[in-house]
Image (cartoon, helix red, strand yellow):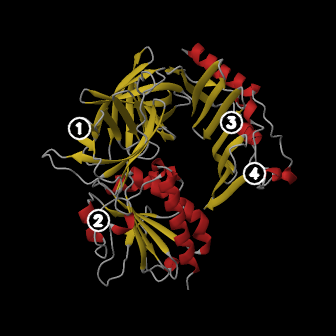
Amino acid sequence: MRASLFLVTTLLLLALCLQRCSIPEESPSEVLIVGLPSPQQIADSLSRSDVMVAKWAIQDSEVVYSLPETIDWQKELESLKKINVNHQRFRDRYTVTDTKIGETRQVRFEANTSGQEVQKMVIHTIGSRVTYYLVEKHSSSFFSGSFIRFEFEPTSYSLELKQKINLVFENRSYVKGLILPAGDLYQIRFDFGGVKAPVQAMINFNKTSPSFYILNDSERVGFNQFHVSGDTFIYHSDHFDSKFRLINIGDGAWSGEWVNRKNETDQIIPVTLKKNIAFRFKPSTVPSHDISGDHALVFVHSDGTIGSPKVLRLSQHYHYLKGSILTETGDYRYLEGVVRNDSFLLSTMDGTHAYLIEGRISKDSINGLFYSGPTNPAKWLIDPSKSPEITAPEKLTNKTGNERFYFSFPDTNNEVISLSDPAFLNKPVVVSIMGTWCSNCADEAQFLKEAHHLYHNDGLRIVAIDFELIADSNRAFANIKRHVNSLNLDYPVLLGGLKSTKATTHDVFPTLSAVVSYPTMIVLDKHHDVAKIHTGFNGPATGPEVYDSFRKEYLSLFDSLLKED
């Protein structure tokens, strides 16, 4: 299998090297956009000795996998390093858009005519770090044609090639590489009462250098707080109050349980781990259909009634499937799986949830089962009569009455912080109603961390108020400290309540019409009047069209509030 994949990769790179790269390296004085990294600089930044890559490839409709191995990025990207249209002489040949949202910069080059060899080049950066790179190059003549597409993200890359010589041969190949942390590749199978939900992880069971990362699409979920008890290896979540307890049963296999402690009663799910399984779900050949797109998903309740629509957002490439479910209260994080000719499978484990979605595909319908633990699965179906849309997050919660929004709660030092404190006087304030057990809240915290970094010196103040599901205040404060430290937050997180529900949380904030989701973000102007309320959080897993639009809107709002008198 690995030999086959090596052959596919070699053929791809050989074919790429035979292509004429007519774009020379530019000098600094000739670049069109200053500060944009060149492909050579991207290759240089990837050349780290500790990087491991696991690949899969498509050749003649068959899927071939390999186990992780080190990679020479200079060789891997040799034929791509000179493909660069960020040059003054291409000014009139490309439409260039340069967008900056906070610290994120997105630059896009689109060819004005189909005759350009490089049709597209896209680079996203955060500061000096490249977070996305895409290049599409094609050429054609009377005798032959070729197409090359290279795409890079911090956790994966792909290389696609189509080649033909008229009346002689035609070839299409695809290689995807997963960029991995240190360790060995394992498949973890969660036992949902006999139904197994697999995910992949990179784990180091060495006691002197332990590490543990769940792999979900572009996400890496850490369980790196480690200790040993007898013959049991225990890996605590970096962020949530959950842990794996594992015992070695020999031959690269482990057995144990995942313990989730977010509620008063622990949720315990049996798990088994097996080393060197290179896939999450075993694919067959590449399916003949593509289910990419947004679908109106509804859950069927036990009494037969239908729930409110959610958006099942899917992106399929060959057999590989990724996506998320968008709801009014937040997304279902990074889902990853495969498509077969009559079905699909998706799973995730984000540190505080484990999900499995089984889907059946027929000519007239898509439906299936949703598992979130060892309980009865929920039935779901795609309703083609409904539009795949959800209510706008600003329309779910409103301010009511004439009373002003207010908070006054203790921090982890047991010091009470109140909206009336001098630190908030004449300053816009962003308040997040959240929980340390909530993965969508962690996504929102990353956004608020960015906002704090951008605007704190200008006067913006951010406060998170945590509502725990447990009754123990000592554990609650420990959860807050873990939340702050793991995300490296610089704004205060206060304890708002214990054994919380949405109803009891609403009791704390009677000026709101309801609290329907954790998180709920309340934006106050300089006079501490409510400027906007955002319910729920659909984060990076939902794709740039949702998340980038949100970031642009709210960072612009914060900026405008700071400029008001």
Where 440 sits versus 374, above or below?
Answer: below
**Residue type marked 4:** Arg
Label 2 with label 3: CB-CB less than 8 Å? no
Label 1: element kind: loop
Disc 4 versus disc 3: distance between alpha carbons?
A: 15 Å
Quarter of the view holding residue 476: bottom left
Q: Residue at x 42, y 81 (%)?
A: 529
Q: Is residue 381 left or right of residue 302?
A: right
Disc 2 versus disc 1: distance between alpha carbons?
A: 29 Å
Label 4: element kind: loop
Label 3: element kind: strand
Q: Is residue 446 visible?
A: no
**Which sits earlier in the primary sequence, circle 2 or circle 1?**
1
Which of the labelled discs sits on residue 377, or is there none? 1
**Which sits earlier in the primary sequence, circle 4 or circle 1?**
4
Q: Is residue 118 left or right of residue 470?
A: right
**Which of the two discs, 2 and 3, sits closer to the camera?**
3
**Which of the two discs, 1 and 3, sits closer to the camera?**
3
Q: Which residue is mark 4?
A: 93
Q: Residue at x 61, y 22 (%)?
A: 171
Q: Which residue is mark 2?
A: 505
**Residue type marked 1:** Pro
Q: Which residue is mark 3?
A: 138
Disc 1 versus disc 3: distance between alpha carbons?
A: 47 Å
Task: State the residue in front, 146 or 23.
Answer: 146
**Residue type marked 2:** Thr
